[in-house]
Image (cartoon, rainbow, N blue to C red):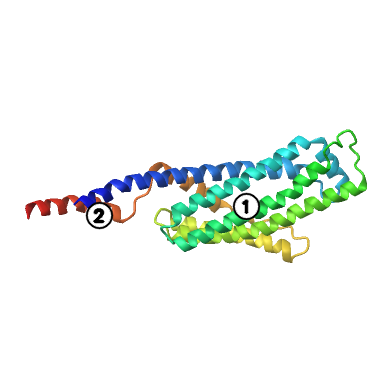
Amino acid sequence: MTNRSITGATRPAADHSQRKVAFAAAFSLLFIALLAPFAQFGAIQNLIVPADTAATTNNIVASAGLFRAGIAAFLIVAILDVVVAWGLYVILRPANESLALLVAWLRVVYAAVFAYALVNLLDVAQLLQGTAATPGSAAPIQGQVASSIASFGNGWDLALAIFGLHLVGLGALLFRSVAFPNFLGALVVIAGAGYLADSFGAILVPDYTLTISVFTFLGEALLIVWLFKLAIRGTRSPESPRILVGAPVRTSEAAAS
């Protein structure tokens, strides 16, 4: 009887801990969803003019603060990805601990590769530092800027292949977990397949211009919503109701005997 009481008492504490982890993962994913578009479309890509290195260099010199803000936002995204990897591992390890650990490490590796690719953008910012008074940069500097920006793009393409594989494994875990619906796992797998297609397309196809991941990201967005729902409401395993209902019956039976 004492063991049953301890087990029942620890369930709410464990559920509360899971809810806090879900909150951490959900907020981290939400901030990633806000910071990544700002960094990519509002700060970095907005300053880059394809096939015009001189214009790109001049834009970065004229908006050095915005360019550095984009780099900082991307770095925060990489750090938050590590938090998400930990949170999803804690939440999903009951479904399959080995797969959950692999999926978590894939996201950590993705974050590390992406952070390493960011060094190229930091090189650009430092290279152009102090040239604000001379907007027309020399050709050698422009060449280095173009090379560093291209290296960042290539590094990100490689990182996204790892991220796509992470999402495929994550979708399989969500499909197995009782805390998430099966359709969410399927959508996350589709999102991962989109990243894999874009990454390998950029590697294998010259002048690859498709962005399949733009149309397959729905699973990532719904995962944020479901994590917030999990954090607010908590989750109950199928065994919980039977334990809670059965315990008084067993106690009364023991008293009667």
Residue lying furthest top: 133
**Marks 1/2: CA distance?**
42 Å
Q: Is mark 1 on a helix, strand or loop?
A: helix
Q: Residue at x 78, y 63 (%)?
A: 206
* Residue at numbered disc 1: 111
Quadrant in the picture for the C terminus = bottom left
Where does residue 197 sit, x and y in percent of width and height?
65, 62
Q: In this view, does 44 lie to the left or right of 246?
A: right
Towards the viewer: 130 or 44:
130
Structural crowding at the residue carrying mark 2, measured as other residues with C-alpha within 10 Å and reported as few (<14), some (14–19) or many (≥20)? few
What residue is drawn where x is 81% and y is 40%?
Answer: 60
Q: Which amino acid does label 1 sit on?
A: Ala
Callout 2 secondary element:
helix
| Residue at image mark 2 | 242
**Residue farthest along the front direction in this orientation:** 2
- Asked if marks 1 and 2 touch (Cβ < 8 Å), the reply is no
| Residue 226 location (% of width, % of height) | 46, 48
